[in-house]
Image: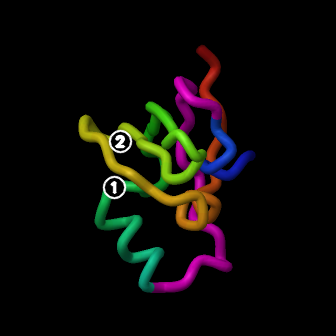
Amino acid sequence: MTPLSRVAVGATATIRDVSDSCPEPVRRRLASLGFDDATRVRKVRRAPMGDPSVYEVMGYQICLRDREAQHIVCELADE
């Protein structure tokens, strides 16, 4: 398992959990954006300075900062 923030650009992962250390308001926001258990997510690109990153989830793209993405625990897909 790895945090979403450490997934390589172009890689696909399956979300397994949101860490217990995640503040409740951030947890609710992530859930409302589609970052739920068993959801597939692909890291599309990183900003030139490394943060934030763009992720594709449920057919749309969304930008998350590493401090948010580090709370999302993923399993890398076997492609």
Tell me how far mark 2 sits from mark 1, CA to CA.
7 Å
**Residue displayed at 49% across by 52% down:** 52
Specify start and end residues of the magenta stretch as a single range.
Answer: 8-24
Q: Is residue 7 above or below residue 52?
A: above
Per the rendering, the mark at residue 34 is: 1
Residue 7 sits in quarter: top right
Position in image of residue 49 (x %, y %): 58, 46
Q: Residue furthest front?
A: 49
Comes first in the chain, label 2 or label 1: 1
Quarter of the image for residue 20 reads bottom right
Residue 31, placed above or below residue 3: below
Alpha-carbon neighbours of circle 1 within 10 Å: few (<14), some, or many (≥20)?
Answer: some
Near-viewer residue (21 or 45): 45
Residue at image point 51% right, 59% down: 65
What's the mark number on residue 75? none
Label 2 crowd (10 A; few <14 / some 14-19 / many >=20): some
Does 78 sit above or below residue 51?
above
Q: At numbered mark 1, what does the secondary structure look like: helix, strand or loop?
A: loop
Q: Position of residue 25 (x, y in %)?
A: 42, 84
Is 15 magenta? The answer is: yes
Say what amino acid the circle numbered 2 marks: Val
The reply to whether callout 2 and callout 1 are in contact (CB within 8 Å) is yes
For the point 45% across and 56% down, the residue is: 64
Q: Position of residue 19 (x, y in %)?
A: 64, 69
The residue that disc 2 covers is: 57
Residue at the right extreme, as displayed = 1
Which quarter of the rendering shows the C terminus? top right
Residue 54, above or below 21: above
Disc 1 residue type?
Answer: Gly
